[in-house]
Image (cartoon, coloured by chain):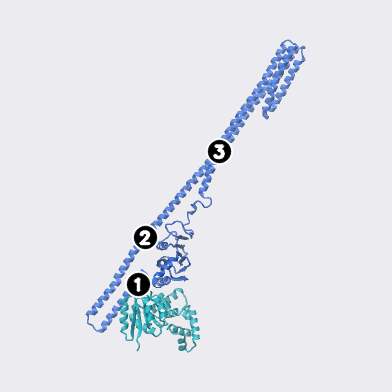
Chain colours: A cyan, B blue
Amino acid sequence: MKKLRILLADDHTVMRTGLRALLERQGNIEIVAEAENGRQAVALCSSLAPEIAIMDVGMPMLNGIEATKALLKESPSTGVVMLSMHSDESYVIRSLQAGARGYLLKDSAASDLLSAIQAVSQGKSFFSPAIRRLLAEDYVRVLQQKGEVDSYELLTMREREILQLLAEGKTNKEVANALHISPYTVETHRSNILEKLGLHSPAELILYAVRKGIIR
Amino acid sequence: MVCSHGDPMEPDEPKTNGGAQAAGSSAYPGKGLGPRAALILGFSALLVLMVVLAVDSVRALHELETSTTQVRRDYLNRERALREIRGGIYDSGNLLREFADTEQSAETRNAYLAQLDDAKKRSTAAMRDCVRQSPQSLRGPLEKLSSQLDDYWRAADETLNEGAHKNYEARLRQAALTQRAAVLAITSEVSDVNELEFRQAEVDVSKVFAGSRQRLQGFAVLTVGVGFLLAISSILYILHLEKHAQERYHESERYRRELKALSKRLVEAQENERRAISRDLHDQIAQTLAALLMNIQSMTESRTNPDSLKRALQKIRLQAEECVQNVRNMALLLRPSMLDDLGLVAALEWQGREVSKRSGLVVDVIDNHFVDDLPDTYKTCIYRVVQEALHNCTAHARARHARVSLEEDSQHCILSITDDGVGFDPTRQRGMGLLGMQERVTQLGGTFAVESAPGKGTSIRVELPLAATTRSESYVS
């Protein structure tokens, strides 16, 4: 069986060592490179094109978010898992906008990292349970404070179905296949969903799904 | 109420000088007819009055003197004329008497006639002078005198011309004497009238004198009054200026005190912060790490079964997680790494959410095409100002909703923070928080304005100048 090729980017050597030890114990994982700043990570990814890049958010030279943007331009097939100290949605949304598909808190990395790597390698998204909980709580609180109706109620059953599939990282075509409908119909549904929920990008759609607890 | 500060040490306000600190600016000359111009005008008027007073009194005295002299001269002239007339009459009487006593030759008669004619001419000339110089009131008695005089001379002439006959002497005496008595009576009457006239003229003069005295008195009273008024207004003006200067002094003194208090507070705040960090490090991190160490120690020493080992490890993991959480919170409090990682807008949004979580205040962060490329000092300044403002919203204003907006144009970065809280009067209350914000903004050359009134919410507006150079700095890092 082919090993999963992974790049580690973190400016703290202790963290990299810990992660390497954790991952190398798995038989099917190979750490192809380590980077200690954003620029190095981008350069290594463009030459090695690993399947997964595990990226620290706060790094010198180029931070993880900017590095993710640059890296995905060079090597679009790489799935990026962000590793962060921050549980705030600002980081999550920006990471998603940059193209990352997983977002993990460093303190739960040991337990969640393998699940994250697995999900992302299958083209899905993954978020730390703590993040999911925080985002969901925030969402409910903001709704209560502003006295607004949950816009999720506006969606039809079919739209909710499609929202879930899209948020899991599926393309229009994959969704169309799964539901036995035309990709154009999916596209129409997709723009209706974005409109109803007041969202503007795939990243926001994923964040929304996380907040609502639709995906995990 | 609006009040605005560019620099606390610079009392001249730039732009939005709404009302709070506008008091007292009207005292400055230069706007319209200032009190200084009014005073100058008043003093000039006073000077003019005094000159007029002096000129008028000199003129009045001169007039009085001339009219008194004139009156006296007229009187004396008339008296002299009367004396002439009387002299002529006496002379003619004597002549007639002598004529009657002497021998009646043609030669003597002619001589007497010539003498008589001379006396007549003198008295007539005097009479004419007297009539010419006399005022209206004397005309009546003088005309009477004149006609009587004419009668007398005619009678005297006739008497002389009749020539010698019986009783001539007696008749001559009779006629001359009768006429003479009448003329003398009239001259004495005229003299009386003249005297009266003189007194009247004197009374008139004194009336004129009284009139001018009254006018002078009026002027004098007016001058004194104006002088008094001017003195009072000068004193008031001086007092006002003095008060104003004192206010200015107190104001700058207050600013100085506030600045001093601010720097003291900053030092204190720094010290407090250090103390808090030190306490957190000691109480939370160090204690947790110590516990962790203890657990590891006991694990390495004991030879228990794998299950209890696993439980102990679980415990260690929990402790480590707690430790990480604490460190993260501390780091965030000191300086949100978000400011560096994600930029200002993200950091402000995060702050809004944090405040929201803690207090229930709904915070909206709005950025209108804000190109998040400010230099670090600007980002920090705006971040801290918003932090302090939101703190005020929750701690003092009891606001339910706050709105933070960021805008920028080619020259400025504009931050405004508005809440719907209880508000306050910025001219009276000005906490250290506001001063601290102002200080931060002033240091970057920006303007800081607070707009609030009790019950009206609070609005803070900050404008930071953006030089072309300040922006490029941020690209260096």
Query: What is the C-alpha distance between the residues marked 3 and 1?
Result: 90 Å
Q: Which mark is residue A105?
A: none
Query: What is the C-alpha distance between the residues marked 3 and 2?
Result: 66 Å
Q: Position of residue B323 (x, y in %)?
A: 31, 74
Q: Which residue is mark 3?
A: B53
Q: Quadrant of residue B152?
A: top right
Left or right, B352 with reference to B313: right
Q: Quadrant of residue B277?
A: bottom left
Q: Position of residue B219 (x, y in %)?
A: 56, 39
Q: Nearer the viewer, residue B218 or B408?
A: B408
Residue type at tag 3: Leu
Query: What is the C-alpha distance between the residues marked 2 and 1?
Result: 27 Å
Question: Farthest residue toward the front?
Answer: A47
Examine the rendered structure and indicate whether residue B293 appears above or below residue B175: below
Mark 3 or mark 1: whose residue is earlier in sequence = 3
Q: Which residue is mark 2?
A: B263
Mark 3 or mark 2: whose residue is earlier in sequence = 3
The number of callouts visible is: 3
Examine the rendered structure and indicate whether residue B235 appears above or below residue A49: above
Residue type at tag 1: Asn
Tell me, yes or no, if residue B83 can be seen here. Answer: yes
Q: Which residue is mark 1?
A: B329
Chain designation of label 1: B
Left or right, B152 with reference to A71: right
Q: Helix, strand, or loop for circle 3? A: helix
Q: Residues within 10 Å of mark 1 (few under 14, many from 20)?
A: few
User: Which quadrant, please, contains the C terminus of chain B?
Assistant: bottom left
Residue type at tag 2: Ser
